[in-house]
Amino acid sequence: MKRTRKKIRAIVRAGKKHRKEAMVAGALAGILLLVGGLLLIGGPHFEVLGKKEDQSAQFGTHPLTGIACENNQKRPYAVMLAADAVARPLSGIAAADMVVEMPVLDEGITRFMAVFACSEPAEIGSVRSSRHDFIPLAAAFDAMYGHWGGSHFALDILNTGVIDNFDGLTNRGNPYYRKDGAPAPHNGFTSFERLEKAALALGYRQTYEGPTYLVKEPEPNEDATGATLSIAYGGPFNVDYIYSAQSNHYTRFRGGAPEKDRTSGATVEASVVAVLFAASRQIEPDYNDVDITGEGRLLLFQDGRVTEGVWRKDDTPREGPLRFFDSDGEEIAFVPGIRWLQYVDTGTDISWRDESY
């Protein structure tokens, strides 16, 4: 039977670490139509298969991000990455097509799930353990899930086979390696090539069957150039994004310093930053529980403007894509490009252009 959020919390409250309750993923409604023909105007700069950003004349666009690339019909890989200061800068973080950041403790400590669809970075890491709140999101994006172990709550779910995954503890398919010179436990790494070889060896489905998001033409806001979006996670985990109308990007800063990619040296930029408010609570000394299903308040930043609305996700991971709606109930269309999804607790301070949200 399907494991709901209530069942997860029941396990947490009971303190039972190894329940055998199955979490069966629902069948997807079918392969959604691919988005095609939109040029990546003003989108983030990145390399795909060794080529520059605009592949729209040669390839179709990926339904998940609207980015044009050769991999436009392939399932993405969603890899857990460390947010700890000692692990910075991360490898492959600037190349990710989408990144989910979420608090994993009440003190503001966060963790990333980086989603790679179009980009094929030669190094991704450091790879960290799974948390149960990320699993339904990886499934909602129809991603193959990469992690190095996990909380007992996460492993209970993963052991039911709810999602195709790569676990560094078993290293089936050999996707991971330990990097010399990196401090443990931050020395676990992978690459797009290694993940792809492992997926083929393990017989995982390759064709994307996830949601298609609406896309729109960019409309840069010159008046917002230099404006800062601030997210108060706490201490070194605080995040700022500074908008540029010239590029129509938001440049990411963390702990007051630019977020850099260790491998490429590139500064992390996003075309879309979504702030998703979700209640959270600490359930054990090392673990949080975040309400990532249902619905909650949304602040969506693109084109130098903010759209207020709601996010929604059904309880069933595979049948419940994450959707975004404005205050009129209309589904929001995205500028094609890299997206960062910032989950925050409901009381987190958010500011944009000197206004508090």
Image (cartoon, rainbow, N blue to C red):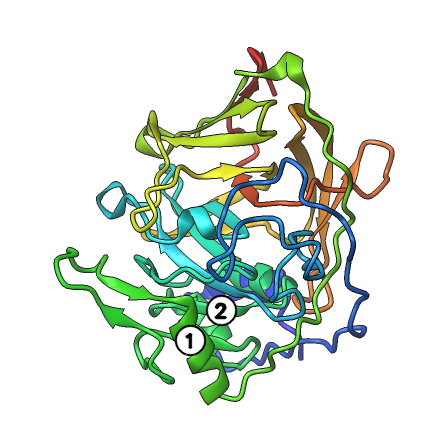
User: Tag 1 or tag 2, which sits nearer the N-term?
Assistant: 2
What residue did someone put label 1 on? 166
Give the image quarter of residue 181: bottom left
Name which residue type carries label 1.
Phe
Q: Nearer the viewer, residue 146 or 76?
A: 76
- Residue that appears at 44% across and 66% down: 153
Residue 195 in the figure: left or right of residue 210: left
Labels 2 and 1 touching (C-beta < 8 A) = yes
Q: Nearer the viewer, residue 102 or 5?
A: 102
332 in relation to 306, above or below? below
Residue 312 in the figure: left or right of residue 236: right
- Residue that appears at 47% across and 55% down: 114
> Residue 16: in sight, yes or no?
no
Percent position (x, y) of residue 16? Answer: 42, 71
What residue did someone put label 2 on? 145
- Residue that appears at 21% across and 60% down: 185
- Determine whether the residue tagged by mark 1 lies in a helix, strand or loop: strand
237 in relation to 73, above or below? above
- Count neighbours of disc 1 (C-alpha within 10 A) and say few if under 14, some if 14 to 19, many if 20 or more: many
> Residue 325: in sight, yes or no?
yes
Percent position (x, y) of residue 357? Answer: 61, 21
Q: Which mark is residue 54?
A: none
Name which residue type carries label 2.
Tyr
